Amino acid sequence: MKSDEIRSRFLKFFSARGGSALGGEGHKIIPSASLVPGDPSVLFTTAGMQQFKPYYTNPGNADKDFGSRNIVTVQKCIRTGDIDEVGDATHLTFFEMLGNFSFGGYGRREAITYAYDFITKELGLKISYVTVYKGEGVVPKDEESKNIWKELDSDLEIREDGKDVFWGPTGDSGPCGPTTEIYCKNADGQDVEIWNIVFNEYFCEGSREKLDRGEANLKKLDILGIDTGMGLERLLATVQNKKSVYETDVFNNEKTKDERIIADHIKASLFIIADGVEPSNTGRGYVLRRLIRRAVRFSKEPLTGQIKKIKKVYNGMYALDDKGEIEREENKFRETLERGMKEFEKGIDPFVLATTYGFPIELTLELSKEKNIKVDLEDFNKKMAEHQKLSQTASAGMFKGGLTDAGEETTRLHTATHLLNAALRLVLGNHVTQKGSNITKERLRFDFTHPQKMTEEEKKRVEEIVNDKIAEELPVGFVEMPKIEAEKIAVHSFNEKYGDIVKVYSIGDEKTGYFSKEFCGGPHVSNTSELGKFKILKEEAVAQGVRRIKAVLI
C-alpha cells in the first residue's frame, strides 16, 4: 500500500464517519494549512491541530466556519527539535500528519474506536500495545480510555505512563490534555508509536516547559476536544514492512546517515520555500538557511539531483518550486564551508570562525561534538554580544533600541515605544512581542507579532491608553539585575541577546503600580509628562504574523 493510497483511505474512512452537529454525513475534509502558521507563538506548523487551536475554546465557531465540528486533514509539518536525530529510522524534519479532530462532536469512545478500526480493519495491522495517562498533579488517571480499550480488545496490553502521554500546549499557551498512544511493530520487530489521540480537556496558560516546571495554570474546558495525529511516514514504514522511513515510497531508499540527512533537509527546504519563506538570518528564514547549509555540509555532490528526486516523489500531490533559492544558497555557502573547514582544522577560535569566515556557530558545535572538542559557548556569546554592540554603534550611528541618534526627540519617541508595547499587549493580548524598532527624530516605527490587521477600535484604544499614561505623569527609571531574575518580571525581545546582567526599565512606581517593565539599554526620559501627545499614523503588515505601527509625538 503506497503513500497516496494511505492518504486517500484515511480521508475516505473519516469522511464517512462521525456526522457533524449540523447533520452532515461525516468528518469534513479540510486542506493542509501553510507551514507558516497564523499562530505567532511558533515559527512553523508543527501539528495538524495548529490551525484548529481556537475551536477548542470556541467550538461553536467550527459550525459556522466548516459546517461541522468534526474535521479530518493531511497536514504538512515541520519540527526541528530533534534535528540531531535525523538520519535514524524514524526522525524527520518534514513530515505529513494524518489527523481527525472534533470540537465537542464526539468523545473518547468514538475517537478510540475509530482509531482501532482504521488500524486493525482498514490497514490490517496488529497493535502491540497502547498507553493511557496514569494521572499526575491535578489531572486524574484516564480510567475511561483504559476501559474502552479493554472492551475493544480484552487481550490488548495497556501501559500507564506520565507526562509523556500528556500532550501540549503548542506555543506559549493553548489546549492540552491526556493522550492514548497506539504502538505497532516495524520490520525490525521494534515497537513504534503510530497514532497519538489527545483528549483536549484543559487550557494551559503557559508553555509546555512552564507546565512541566509546575509554573503554568490549567483550566478545565467546558467541552472535550479530540485531536489525533498519525505520522504518515512512520505509518508507511509499518504498512510496507520497512526498517526505516527512508525505505518507503516518500523517499528514495537513502542508505547512509549522510544521505538521509540531505534528503530530509532538502525536502523540508522545498516545502518551506513553497509556502513563501526565503533564506535569511532571522526567524523562519534562518531555520531554512540552516537546513540548506546542513545539507550542503553532508553532500559531496550538488544538491540539484536530490531536488529533482524529491519533486518527482510528490509530483501531482504538492507543487514544490524553489525558484532556484536552494542552489543560490548552496553556491554561497560552499565557499564559506571550504574556507571555514580549513580554519576549523587549525583550531581557530569559534568567534573568529563566525565573524571572519562566516562559519555558523551551529556547524562549529556540530563538528566539535563529532571530534569530542569542547566549545566555550558562554565565551563565544559574550564576544558576539560585544561585537554586535560595536558594529551597531559604528554603523550609521545606531544606538540601542533602534535609535538613529540619542537626541531629545528620539529619546522621547523611544520611551513612547515602551508605552506602546504595553498598550498593545493590553488591547490585543500577551502574544504580542516586539520584533524590531526604528526611531528617527520625526517618528517611531514598531514591529510586533499579531496574526491580523488591527481594527480602528483597537488602534483608537491603544492611542487612548498611551495618552492616558502620559497624562498620569508616571516616573521612568531602571534597575540592573541578573537576567534570570529579570526574565520573571519584565518583557523582552526574543530576537536580542542579553548579558548575564541586564537593565530593566519601568514606567510607573510601586505605589501606583507599574504599567511597563522591559529589558532595555536606554536612553529614556525621566517622566512620561515629557512626551506630549501620542498619535498612530499607520498600521500595516510586515510579514506573516508580524505587524508594524508608525507613530509620532505631537
Image: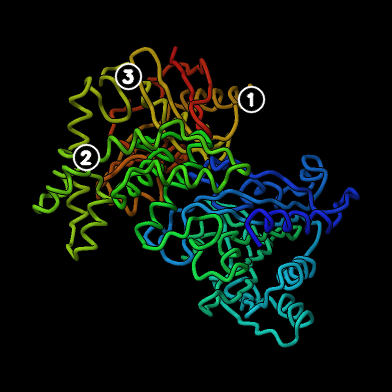
Say which quadrant the N terminus sits in: bottom right
Dot 3 or dot 2, earlier in sequence: 2
As drawn, 413 above or below 265: above
Spatial separation of the CA atoms under disc 1 and disc 2: 46 Å
As drawn, 87 above or below 466: below
Q: Quadrant of residue 221?
A: bottom right
Q: Locate residue 190, reporting x and y percent.
A: 52, 78
Spatial separation of the CA atoms under disc 3 and disc 2: 39 Å
Q: Which residue type carries mark 3?
A: Thr
Spatial separation of the CA atoms under disc 1 and disc 3: 28 Å
Choose mark 1 or mark 3, whichever is in front. 1
Nearer to us in this view, 110 or 330: 330
Which disc is residue 410 wearing?
3
Q: Name the residue beneath numbered marker 1.
A: 455
Dot 1 or dot 3, earlier in sequence: 3
Residue 393 visible, this angle: yes
Choose mark 1 or mark 2, whichever is in front. 2
Q: Locate residue 253, reporting x and y percent.
A: 47, 60
Q: Identify the residue at image location x=54%, y=40%.
A: 36
Secondary structure at badge 2 equals helix
Dots 3, 2 in contact, CB < 8 A: no
Which disc is residue 546 wearing?
none
Which disc is residue 336 wearing?
2
Q: Which residue type carries mark 2?
A: Thr
**Colouring convention used in this rendered image of the protein:** rainbow
